[in-house]
Amino acid sequence: MQEALFLYLCIRISTTFGSSSDLRIYGGRDAQLGEFPYVVVLGHLHEDNNFELTCSCSALSPTWSLTAAHCMDSNEAKGVIAYGDIIPGQKFNVSKVLRVFPHPGYKSAGNAEEYETGNCYDIGLLRTNKIKIAQYGLLSAVDHTTITGHEVIVAGFGVTNGTKDFSGAIAANKTLQVFKGMISSCLEEDFLLCSRLCVSPTCKQPSLICGGDSGGPVIHASGIVGVNGYHNIECEYFTDDHSLAQGSSVVQAVSPVIDWLTNTINSHS
């Protein structure tokens, strides 16, 4: 009965940076109102109603959301999901996170190098109080090894590149950020062994995920095929001189864990 006791809150996003039309992720754009209502935000709501972003995620149903397992390493994972068409300065709803389910194969990394080379299951589920939105995300069961070269959309509320301080999208007064990419083969052997995907920019347009985009969806025509993991270079140092391989984003594929995702939802609902 814990869910019944939770009150949905309407709060205003606190913006500490001025609005600017130049703020974008690399090669990306603002999502249109209602375009991806199921892309939501994991974070912490402070006593003064300021919202602090931890990661992006996807609402799969009223009570289940998908994100990266490393987003659950923080105590803030036991926070709230903010949802709706989240536009700074407007009201949005929050729903309490009741329980986290990192994939059982995930091992919390002690440092960035260990995470990048040794963690094969950076994906997990959040069980929450009800999230009421117009559309929920659809998981794709398409074999991730068959979609190399396919176009995808990458979404997240992470760092933007229009400010010296590299503010998160919400703090920088921006809505959801999206960009187009192409599924490519990950060159490193560890990526192949870990059932990861890489997303490279299209048409030599520099684009990659940044901090805060972790956990957000990689959207294929068949549905969500992956979860944003990390970028293999720091966004602050990204320039047009980097090669496409250097500028790729690394993604945990959904298809190898689709049975675990489905069974977890069914057994804990």
Image: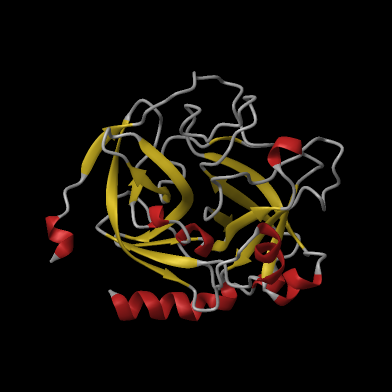
Percent x, y of residue 108: 55, 68
Of residues 135 and 179, which is closer to you in this image?
A: 179
Which of the 4 image quarters holds residue 93? top left
Q: Can I make out residue 62 in this image?
A: yes
The residue drawn where x is 64% and y is 60% is 111
What quarter of the picture does the C terminus occupy?
A: bottom left
Is 137 above or below relative to 141? above
Which of the 4 image quarters holds residue 162? top right
Percent x, y of residue 60: 39, 61
Percent x, y of residue 163: 62, 24
Q: Does 249 sit left or right of 52 as displayed?
A: right
What quarter of the picture does the N terminus occupy?
A: bottom left
Percent x, y of residue 235: 69, 40
The residue drawn where x is 65% and y is 31% is 161
The number of numbered discs placed on residues in the rendered structure image is: 0
Q: Does 156 sit left or right of 99 as displayed?
A: right
Of residues 62 and 214, which is closer to you in this image?
A: 214
Of residues 115 and 249, which is closer to you in this image?
A: 115
Q: Can I make out residue 220 in this image?
A: no
Direction front: furthest residue:
110
Is 112 above or below relative to 211? below
Q: How is the image coloured?
A: secondary structure
